[in-house]
Image (tube, rainbow, N blue to C red):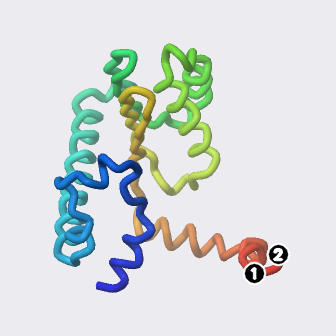
Amino acid sequence: MENVIKRSKKLPACTDESNATRESINFIDLLEPEAVNQSNDGLRRLFREYLDAERNLMATSPMLFESDQENYSDSYKWLRFPTQDEYPETVSYLNKSDVELFPNDRLAGLLLAVLKNQVPSNVQMQGVSIDRVGTSFRFCISGSTSLEALQILFGQNEPRQDFEDERKPGK
């Protein structure tokens, strides 16, 4: 239980007094191993439901590239991660969008550009979901890989010496 408490202490507490007095959240319960396990089980179940819904959407609508629900301050965008052939056109199209009118598109373009340059080819990216409420944006990136692909990837990419040097004190 002590490890759970130590990790949980890193989480930010309530940020204002009205939240601090709210009875609907009991932070002590969150520190209990059973409560943590229930939360993890719930997140895992919802994660699998999300992936199933995304796979179903892609299977039933193979030509669907993106789906938008726009309402200025409350919007949702799902975007299929583009193939190598579609990539330059897609990112260009999204990044040309007006950030004031289509912020979800601009964020999607940024995420695609960063991920395409950082994620190895043996990690398959599936989709990007962006949920906007007011001025806050939350996003989820889905993808998959195999144990074999990870073994190949990490077998080919030994830890970089310069990364280890950066972690040493005095560097």
Q: Residue at x 63, y 71 (%)?
A: 156
Give the amino acid type for the residue marked by disc 1 in the picture: Lys
Residue 22 lies, in percent from the top left, at 22, 52
- Label 2: element kind: loop
Query: Residue at coordinates 40% horizontally, 34% vertically from top-left?
Result: 130
Instruction: State left or right for residue 15 relative to residue 39.
Output: right
Q: Tag on residue 113?
A: none
In the image, what residue occupies the spot 57% across and 52% down?
119
Nearer-the-camera pick, 80 or 23: 23
Position in image of residue 51 (x %, y %)? 27, 47
Q: Is residue 53 left or right of residue 17?
A: left
Q: Position of residue 89 (x, y in %)?
A: 59, 23
Q: Are marks 2 and 1 in contact (CB under 8 Å)?
A: yes
Crowd tier of the residue under label 2, counting other residues whose Cα lies within 10 Å: few below 14, some 14–19, many 20 or above: few
Which one is nearer the viewer's eye here, 111 or 15?
15
Quadrant housing residue 9: bottom left
The quadrant of the image that shows the C terminus is bottom right
Q: Quadrant of the N terminus?
A: bottom left
**Position of residue 121 in the picture relative to residue 133 (left or right):** right
Query: How many angstroms separate mark 2 from mark 1 (CA)?
Result: 6 Å
Q: Secondary structure at mark 1?
A: loop
As drawn, the label of residue 171 is 2
Q: Local crowd at mark 1 within 10 Å, few (<14), some, or many (≥20)? A: few
Task: Pinpoint residue 26: horizontal percent, then vertical percent.
Answer: 21, 63
The residue pinned by badge 1 equals 168
Tag 2: amino acid = Lys
Asked whether 99 or 151 is in front, the reply is 99
- Would you identify the image quadrant in which residue 11 lies? bottom left
Image vertical order of residue 45 relative to residue 57, above or below:
below
- Residue at position x 49%, y 55% in the image: 123
In the rendered image, the vertical position of residue 49 relative to residue 6, given as above or below: above
